[in-house]
Amino acid sequence: MKSKNATLKIIVLAVLILLSCVYLLPIYVMVTNSLKTLPEITQRTYLALPREWQFQNYTSALFGSRDFLIPMRNPIINSSIISVAVTALAAFFGGLGGYYLSRTKSTFARVIFVLVGIALYMPYQAVIIPLTTITAKTGLINSHFGLILCYLIINVPLASVLMGTFFLGVPRELEEAAEVDGASRIQIFFKVVVPISLPAYASVAILIFTQVWNEFFIALTLITPKTQTVQVAMAMTQGSTISPYNLQMAASLLTVAIPLVFFLFLGRYFIRGVLAGALKG
Amino acid sequence: MIATKAPMARKRRKKGIAVAEFLVFTLPLLVFLIILYGTLLWNFYVSTSNWVSTAADYSFTGLKWYQYLFRQGRFWVDVQNNLKWLILGVVPTTILAILLAYLLELAPIRGVESYVRTLILYPVAMSFVVTGTIWSWMYQPEKGVFNTILRSVGIDSPLTFTNNPDQATYWLILIFVWQYLGFAVIIIQSSFRTTELQEMIEAATVDGASKLRILFSVIIPNIRAGILVLVSLLLINSLKVFDIVWIVTRNGPGIATDVLATNMIVTAYDQRLFSAGAAIGVIIFLIAFILVIPYTIYALKKWFE
């Protein structure tokens, strides 16, 4: 659809400039202000460039300092443990469940599919009170397992649909050949299907990791100081008297760093995961 | 005798293997589904009991806590705000996404598409906690980013953004639209990219139809499935909205920006009215359930076709 229309070019250019401003401004504000000194911040010239770049703000935000009492180091470690564990387990279990859903057309499979479909959009508010009760009664709330369990409940169904979507596109001929050779379904799955679905696993893993890393509601409700996640720590810096704004911005950047790096360098997998989650499931 | 026994035994063994295989594939998923729906039912049970302190109390009270909620002015403020979210979080995002996706299809400048994709999609990787934090800087009335920009072009802005109770919710919804626009665009884009649709567009172009005409009479009717998916996802996400409100305004000023999700936390964990909080949870679930019905039917058909 090549167009020689000059007005079209002008419209595109205008939209481009507008979008660039609207989407780069928040990042610009976050980066520049995270590199300023506190007096520069209190003058509230948020749009000015820093006079001198204060890279030590990042170490203060990470390890804490006299003015910043919410060091991000432990929350980052907690969030990493929780997100990695949930991602690995959900992708593994979801792969198994998704394979079943993509290869069976029984009524049972349809019922499971509907239950999974509703589970994907379950509002956490409708399950949070029982979840806090369970994790408190079993003591799981005091370790990372409490949050891991809660996130698995939501993310295993999600991973099943995502992986199933990919498996629907895997040609059956390969599996039929292995079946003729006498391989069991389990052998076929692990030896034939999984190896050619590794890119799909990567997409699903990135999507789930980002979701769990960014989740706030459950993390806020189930939190104990020992298992505080980055989002909850970040929320504590908001409007708080113990966090100078420049360090708050540095902490924001630390909070988004890992998912943003995934997005920038593995964008293709990222987009494929988002699309799989949206279109077919 | 021996000849007939052997195949039967083999058959039985084969059946055993089939059951074992079935369990390997489905058991983990089933366990988590059972926990999930178990907690959902449990939550419903809590909403009909009388749990009003830190100690759980499961004596049956019927719909008492639902009636309690319906008598609260705050509940109806939430309903109104949730309606604003459902409409303004979904309609403008969808329209903008369709226009932008179409413009990208038409864009004659090379490299524009991948640039725009990265530009508007990066917020998908960020949490609402961080986005909300940055936007509350932009929205500060005195020397916030927006008012500074307006002043530098000579406008003495009267806007106080989220500090104004009448407008606060709308400014919060703007953050949501900003964050979800990129996501919406890639979903619409991918439904543009079918060969049938591309052929139809080409045919219409040859016939001399204008670009707007093509958009309204060729493209939009043919990407209904993509629009259904997008609208459903946006509806659910704007219904579930919690983080933006909690971070930027904390329900305020007063309770002007309160929504069901934030009220649920306040009712259950601050006021310790767990049964009433559970009732709000049930109400949110029922709305979500109704909203995803068309989508679930569509997905079910597509999956098992």
Image (cartoon, rainbow, N blue to C red):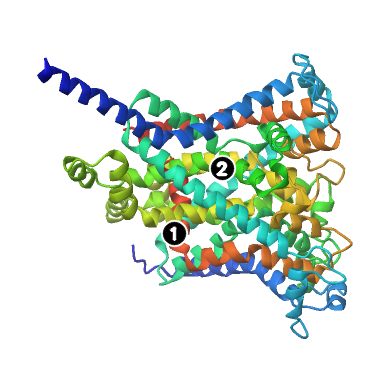
Please, what secondary structure does the residue beneath circle 2 have? helix
Q: Which residue bears the numbered disc 1? A: A269
Residue at image location 73% in from the left, 25% down from the top? B279
Callout 1 touching callout 2 (CB < 8 Å): no
Does the rendering let one see residue A14? Answer: yes
Mark 1 or mark 2, earlier in chain: 2
Let me know if residue B99 appears in the view: no
- Specify the label residue A40 is tagged with: none
Q: Amino acid at mark 2?
A: Leu
Residue that mark 2 sits on:
A152
Tell me the element at label 1: helix
What amino acid does circle 1 point to? Tyr
Chain of the residue under the numbered disc 2 shown in the image: A
Residue B53 position in % (x across, y down):
85, 28
Q: Where's the N terminus of chain B, which quadrant?
A: top left
- For the point 34% across and 45% down, the residue is A167
Q: Position of residue A116 (x, y in %)?
A: 49, 34
Callout 1 and callout 2 share a chain: yes
